[in-house]
Image (tube, coloured by chain):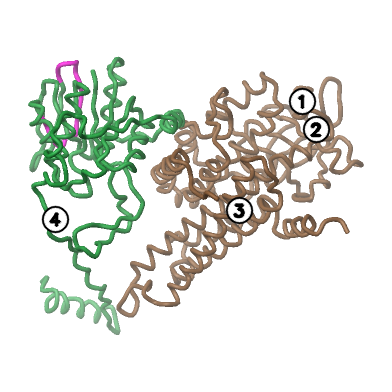
Chain colours: A brown, B green
């Protein structure tokens, strides 16, 4: 067994941590308070080239391994989850199908500008009545001449209202359930494609999340993103483990940020004539938090290693996402207790961590759905 | 023009540092960075290279193997080459020995310009830059806050002096130490990060630089650490009590007069 990062991975971790500390951490509170997409930071950060993290060097990417990707997701979420969501959407889900199935012209038009941060990408799964239950997708794609006509409404779309293109999940045959699902590329400016309600979220503020409307949107055959009709759900499976591990890594990032705030406070805050870190009940909280975070870290990075090696990690990825997120919720809760009443005030940062952590409970699959999946997979068909 | 930047890897300002039981050495948490002031030197070197395209930036440190990470950071920022002069077995607190080694390296490599931070933030000696310039017999200006290479012969600088600044023209080759405010060190692009990750950084044995071993080994140091002490703990915060704001202010004034002797 070798748990060590390579020298290159260690270096990457340090560089990205420094970059986050310099560029993102100082703006985190402002991003949260304004709840507006931070375009200046977006241009500055994406200009560094990190959107191409996962993609090969031939297309201008970094070809980072999965451990490095998790390191990146963890660090950027430590800085600002609101900003991290938008960036990671461009890096991972928003460009995945365009890279995998897009024609050269589509890659030139969408993928490359997205990797430079010049275009904002997103992916649309969720609808008002379906999220984890993909089989209930009601958005339809009907063959029409040399293309497809798409109708439906998507909800909870990260980057949705500001996106330049999206990969939309639609069914070409609702009677087939999961086997009728397919992905299509829809670009901004296509007649019938518009954004609707922008959600006023509890946390992850700064990311623009909302509704996308597809009203008789026609796209050419080229925009069908897949090798074969009806295989959309299988393609989702190819990226799902990475998405779940990514969510776990983001949870670790929030937890680390919260833990650091708690540590600083416990060392400085004086009560009864001494720093509160001297009190046993406060020390116990740090022992608990550190133990839980270490366990979560082992799961997330073990999952990343399995993924990199091409080994099965479906159950572990679900477990890691679930566990790391629960740990994150526990750590942010402890931060608010250590901080005392000030944690209840918007002027201080603990409430931001507390609100941000909640989103990860739903993104990447609710824990109820994940528990059911894990149990079902472990027990098997009886 | 070969631009040499000397850097040092130092403990992160947030790293936990303990004095070991021998009272002469430190145990430092594994968190290290490029010295704060060296980042300005790196940025100035890269900007100069951008202006004079045929220049190359060579970065070098005298330190332990872990300092390769700081060299990689320099490459990510834009340095062309990096060298680690491995100090394993030659660790020293004596700036003079460090300066001898770095100046020997500069002589061997050749240079038109040398830059380094005005001081390291760990020992805060601010010795090495000036010593290297002296050993190389070249001009030196410290705490530079404006820096412009006019041509391959001349540099215009402003540097901090007590209560003001001094402007000067310096003939190259010369050595400059850099001060906060000179520039904003760049955040590395992903292309730089990738280059740095792949870079093979040569390790130089200090005994191959033409110096006598006895001049740089552990016995050569003219400085011996007798003991290390932590700074005194600050007294705890005192909360001024009182029934009313007026009484709290009265109590505060009394404490400032009688206990703190500040009034």
Q: CA distance from mark 3 to mark 4?
A: 58 Å
Is B257 contained in the magenta span? no
Q: Are the residues flagged by discs 4 and 1 in contact, CB closer than 8 Å?
A: no
Q: CA distance from mark 1 to mark 3?
A: 32 Å
Q: Position of residue B74 (x, y in %)?
A: 33, 33
Q: For the view shown, which residue lies furthest in the bottom direction?
A: B243
Label 1: state its secondary structure.
Answer: strand
Residue at the spot 55% in from the left edge and 45% down from the top edge: A70
The residue carrying mark 4 is: B225
The residue carrying mark 2 is: A150
In front of the other: A168 or A178: A178
Label 2 Cα neighbours within 10 Å, binned few <14 / some 14-19 / many ≥20: many
Q: Are the residues flagged by discs 1 and 2 in contact, CB closer than 8 Å?
A: yes
In front of the other: A78 or B239: A78
Q: Position of residue A37 (x, y in %)?
A: 53, 42
Label 1 Cα neighbours within 10 Å, binned few <14 / some 14-19 / many ≥20: many
Q: Which mark is residue A219?
A: 1
The residue carrying mark 3 is: A201
**Chain containing mark 4:** B
Label 4: state its secondary structure.
Answer: loop
Q: Position of residue A379 (x, y in %)?
A: 80, 59
Residue at the spot 47% in from the left edge and 49% down from the top edge: A79
- In the image, residue B46 sits, relative to residue A6, either above or below, namely above
Query: Does residue B32 appear left or right of residue A299 in this picture?
Result: left
Pointers 3 and 4 within a single chain: no
Label 3 Cα neighbours within 10 Å, binned few <14 / some 14-19 / many ≥20: some
**Chain containing mark 2:** A
Majority secondary structure of magenta residues: strand
Pointers 1 and 2 within a single chain: yes
Query: Does residue A38 appear left or right of residue B159 in this picture?
Result: right
Label 4 Cα neighbours within 10 Å, binned few <14 / some 14-19 / many ≥20: few
Q: CA distance from mark 3 to mark 2?
A: 28 Å
């Amino acid at each position: 067994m070798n748990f060590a990062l390579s020298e290159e991975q260690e270096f990457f971790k340090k560089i990205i941590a420094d970059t986050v500390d310099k560029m993102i951490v100082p703006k985190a509170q402002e991003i949260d308070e304004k709840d507006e997409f931070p375009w200046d930071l977006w241009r500055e950060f994406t200009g560094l080239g990190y959107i191409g993290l996962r993609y090969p060097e031939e297309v201008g990417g970094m070809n980072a391994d999965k451990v490095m990707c998790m390191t990146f997701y963890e660090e950027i979420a430590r800085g600002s989850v609101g900003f991290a969501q938008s960036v990671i959407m461009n890096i991972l889900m928003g460009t995945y199908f365009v890279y995998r199935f897009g024609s050269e012209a589509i890659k030139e038009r969408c993928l490359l500008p997205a990797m430079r941060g010049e275009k904002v990408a997103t992916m649309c799964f969720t609808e008002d009545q379906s999220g984890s239950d993909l089989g209930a997708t009601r958005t339809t794609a009907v063959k029409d001449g040399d293309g497809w006509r798409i109708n439906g409404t998507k909800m909870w779309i990260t980057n949705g209202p500001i996106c330049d293109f999206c990969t939309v999940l639609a069914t070409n045959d609702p009677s087939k359930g999961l086997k009728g699902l397919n992905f299509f590329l829809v670009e901004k400016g296509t007649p019938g494609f518009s954004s609707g309600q922008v959600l006023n979220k509890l946390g992850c503020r700064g990311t623009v999340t909302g509704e996308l409307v597809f009203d008789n949107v026609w796209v050419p055959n080229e925009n069908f993103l897949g090798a074969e009709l009806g295989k959309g759900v299988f393609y989702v499976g190819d990226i799902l483990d990475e998405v779940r591990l990514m969510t776990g890594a983001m949870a670790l990032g929030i937890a680390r940020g919260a833990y650091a705030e708690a540590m600083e406070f416990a060392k400085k805050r004086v009560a009864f004539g001494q720093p509160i870190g001297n009190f046993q009940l406060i020390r116990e909280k740090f022992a608990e938090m550190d133990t839980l975070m270490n366990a979560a870290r082992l799961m997330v990075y073990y999952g990343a290693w399995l993924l990199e090696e091409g080994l099965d990690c479906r159950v572990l990825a679900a477990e890691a996402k679930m566990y790391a997120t629960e740990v994150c919720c526990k750590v942010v809760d402890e931060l608010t207790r250590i901080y005392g009443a000030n944690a209840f005030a918007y002027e201080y940062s603990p409430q931001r961590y507390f609100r941000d952590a909640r989103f990860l409970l739903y993104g990447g699959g609710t824990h109820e759905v994940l528990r059911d999946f894990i149990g079902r997979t472990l027990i098997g068909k009886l | 023009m070969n631009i040499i930047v000397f850097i040092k890897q130092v403990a992160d300002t947030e790293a936990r540092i303990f004095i070991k039981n021998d009272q002469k050495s430190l145990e430092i948490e594994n968190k290290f960075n490029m010295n704060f002031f060296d980042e300005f030197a790196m940025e100035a070197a890269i900007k100069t290279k951008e202006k004079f395209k045929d220049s190359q930036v060579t970065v070098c440190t005298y330190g332990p193997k872990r300092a390769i990470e700081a060299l990689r950071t320099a490459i990510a920022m834009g340095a062309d080459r990096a060298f680690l002069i491995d100090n394993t077995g030659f660790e020293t607190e004596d700036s003079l020995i460090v300066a001898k080694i770095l100046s020997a390296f500069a002589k061997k490599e050749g240079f038109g310009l040398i830059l380094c931070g005005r001081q390291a933030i760990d020992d805060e000696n601010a010795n090495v830059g000036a010593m290297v310039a002296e050993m190389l017999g070249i001009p030196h200006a410290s705490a530079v806050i404006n820096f412009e290479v006019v041509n391959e012969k001349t540099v215009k600088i402003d540097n901090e002096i007590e209560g003001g600044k001094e402007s000067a023209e310096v003939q190259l080759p010369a050595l400059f130490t850099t001060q906060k405010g000179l520039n904003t060190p760049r955040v590395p692009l992903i292309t730089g990060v990738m280059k740095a990750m792949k870079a093979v950084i040569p390790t130089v044995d200090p005994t191959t630089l033409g110096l006598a071993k006895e001049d740089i080994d552990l016995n050569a140091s003219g400085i011996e650490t007798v003991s290390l002490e932590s700074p005194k703990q600050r007294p705890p915060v005192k909360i001024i009590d009182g029934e009313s704001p007026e009484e709290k202010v009265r109590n505060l004034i009394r404490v400032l007069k009688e206990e703190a002797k500040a009034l």
